[in-house]
Image (cartoon, rainbow, N blue to C red):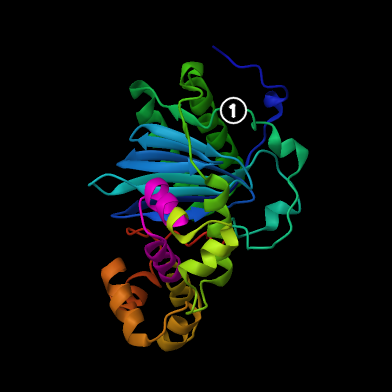
Amino acid sequence: MERNITGIERLSPFVRSVKITESDYLVGEWVDYDHVYTYIEQGEAEILLDGIQYQLKAGEAILFPPMKLHFIRSVSSEPLIQYIFHFDLFHWEDQSKWQQTGVSQGQPFVIKPEEELLSTLYPISCIHPAHRLEVHKRFHLLHQEFRSKRPYHQLFMKSLALELLIYFLRNQHESNEGTGRKTKGWASIEKSIFYIQQDFSNPQLNLEQISQHAGLSTNHLSHLFKEQLGMTIHKYVTYVRIEEAKRKLLENSLSITQISEMAGFTSIHAFSRTFKTIVGLTASQFIETYSASGIHRKQLELNSFQED
């Protein structure tokens, strides 16, 4: 059944970023100032959006609204392949010049009222098997246009984005609404995540400090993280630090020792050991593999508020 969304016929999406990512293991959180359309091509993921937990599998898509903290964790044995594009619902002269998609902590941003047009949508759509090949084709065309920057590529990307949005809307089923499970203690988890993002570079950051900021006991907060995010707080902090190190390794000319210190590690030895365990490469190998690569085969999503 078609949903009556006032003003939807005026949509004129501006595509800012397009990527196809593959990750053997993904965990992290993001806040973006634009919309994010994500289609799961392979694998399964657990997603927390606005305190609601969703399970996504191959053939399903999710639409993240602007400025909503979302946590993503891959939960299948096979690599997670995601087709993703960032976009505004309309073309804005000021926002069209912005390159980053993630929001830096403390950065002021006001959502334009027109960009809330789809705010009442249920965020998940199960794409019918008969439509998945078409979605697959359009994503690859979109990715190709974004990378090639051929004449009129923005116009072509707008048309492809509209088609992908139509597939999303046509495959929504109202019976699915409300199936997401409300996450216990989401407000406390969210407060903890923001605090960790602000202070991960402090090597003395510990569970007691994080718990105090969240207003919970250490045991209660530890239980929430383990139950809802599937990991300990210590492991989460470690992943945040590693993602920051990955970003700096690719973007800066600092030494690996300097980067390890800025990411909050107490020593270069601790950083090197942890980096190799999580990433599967040494820091030097990571730089060599990805710094000049135009296509990322491994997941290079940067940590929250620093995506792209």
Q: Is residue 66 above or below residue 262?
A: above
Specify whether 187 is left or right of 62. right
Is residue 288 visible to us here?
yes
Give the residue at mark 1.
Answer: 121
Q: Whole-percent x and y of residue 23? A: 32, 54
Tell me the magenta residue range.
221-242
SS category of the residue bearing label 1: loop
Quadrant of residue 271 in the image? Answer: bottom left
Q: Nearer the viewer, residue 162 or 56?
A: 56
Quadrant of residue 127 in the image? Answer: top left
Instruction: Please tell me whether the stretch drawn in magenta is mainly helix, strand or loop.
Output: helix
- Residue 193 lies in the magenta stretch: no
Q: Residue furthest top?
A: 1
Residue type marked 1: Leu
User: What's the residue at 54%, 56% (across, down)?
Assistant: 216
Q: Whole-percent x and y of residue 267? A: 38, 87
User: What's the residue at 50%, 24% (across, down)?
Assistant: 178
Specify whether 281 is left or right of 265. left
